[in-house]
Amino acid sequence: MNPKIAAIGCALVLASPVRSQHQASLEDLKVVRHRTYAVDQFLEVRGGALYGFADGEDPVRYVENSLVFDGSAYLRTKNPITGQGRLDAYVGRDGFYGSIIDGDPKTAKNYTRFEVFGRQWASFIREGFYQGDDFIPVGMYDYRWWKARMLLAANVTEGLKGEMGVFYGQNAFDRNGQTSGSYTIPDDHAVYGFEVLGEENRLEVDPATRLPYKGYTFSGWITQEWNDSQQTFGIVGRESRLPKSLIRGGAHFEYYMPASDTTSWFITGDGMISPKDDRITIYDPWKTQGRWWIDGTFELRWLLGDHFSLQPGVRVQYLRLADEFGTSEENKFFWGGQVRTRWDPSESVAVVTEQCIHNESREPVELGQDTQPALAFAVPSQVLRAPGRSRPRIRAGRATPSGDMRPGSMGLASPSSARSTSHGR
């Protein structure tokens, strides 16, 4: 199987005192309950453009070149109503997310969280099958959705948190210019049910680089969902109804292991299991498509001085998806290499690049039309972050998370000379 290049990106980061291994996204915010950052409050704004290159254009399969403006904004701050807890607000090409926590998740035994999130743009269903490495779509249509969750949460032990509660949402569908005349789309319907989430976070952040360097975090969830959908949908001869009751589960995992003062190994992974007839979730291209799927990376982060880092790695993807006739399922395996680089010439500027080899059926590029680019290129994006504590001083002595010098320290501190531990801030 020939791996395909899936993404090459570049971003210019301005005034960014906080750096995470993961850029904020709708999927990450939905699953990772308390991602570790070096500071508690910040605003991040990104803007740029994303260009998708086809690995040999094929209009029949919508494998085409495409250009779209790309960007996102993410605010993380204190609860403005009570002064305790946290407010998260995100909007990007991949959707929107809002969350407010009543109570301090770092110290309170119990607290509550209310969330609203969804996608109203650049959201599609791409139903199809694989023919070799090529993805053949048979049903493509617009998909708009939102969901609200009310969760009760608890600190079980230090670093271990649990949440459970109820949700309600709406799914809406529309035909578009890519929808086949022989395909019937689903009817609009409501979804509701309950969800249980858990997370153990034992990551340690290096204040000098503001990146996690040691420890692990594991987030898992399980959902019981009901819906009021009434109609059959699908291609002629293979229509079916959405099951009234659906149970799904998934997980996210990160593990970091320092190899030296300037290098760290880390493994990340995501996975999900859905019922056989859960066709809307299975064919949502904003995640790996499949009834079962696992998407993982194994990388080495290499700090070259105080301002530059190189991050080579390997990406592996396994999925299980129905075949052309829908009578059985096929196991598909994709793999490839990727390289990320980051250059911080000053406290307020960073340049980030990324490239990887990935599955052809990847996330959409355009806002109004679904395409299957084999290669995506992001031109420099600007990022502004505030408020937030200043970047730690690493040129003389050891740094503290606030940037103050520790008494009695002298000389040049290596990037690993100052560490801080954060359990699920």
Image (cartoon, helix red, strand yellow):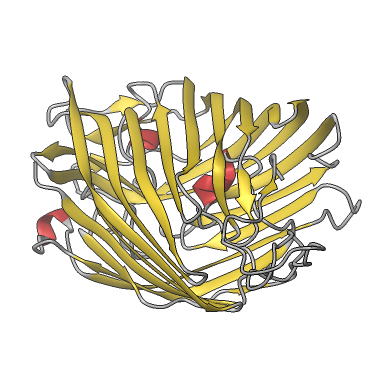
Residue 313 at x, y percent in the picture: 31, 49
Is 109 in front, or is 324? 109
- Location of residue 137 by image quarter: top left
Q: Is residue 110 left or right of residue 228?
A: right
Q: Is residue 191 left or right of residue 323?
A: right
97 relative to 232, above or below: below
Q: Quadrant of the N terminus?
A: top left
Residue 248 at x, y percent in the picture: 47, 24
157 relative to 342, above or below: above
- Location of residue 377 by image quarter: bottom left
33 relative to 26, above or below: above
* Point 51% across, 56% down: residue: 95
Q: Is residue 403 left or right of residue 169?
A: right
Q: Is residue 161 left or right of residue 324?
A: right
Residue 233 at x, y percent in the picture: 31, 33
* Point 77% across, 28% down: residue: 155
* Point 49% across, 37% down: residue: 255
- Location of residue 10 by image quarter: bottom left
Q: Quadrant of the C terminus?
A: top right
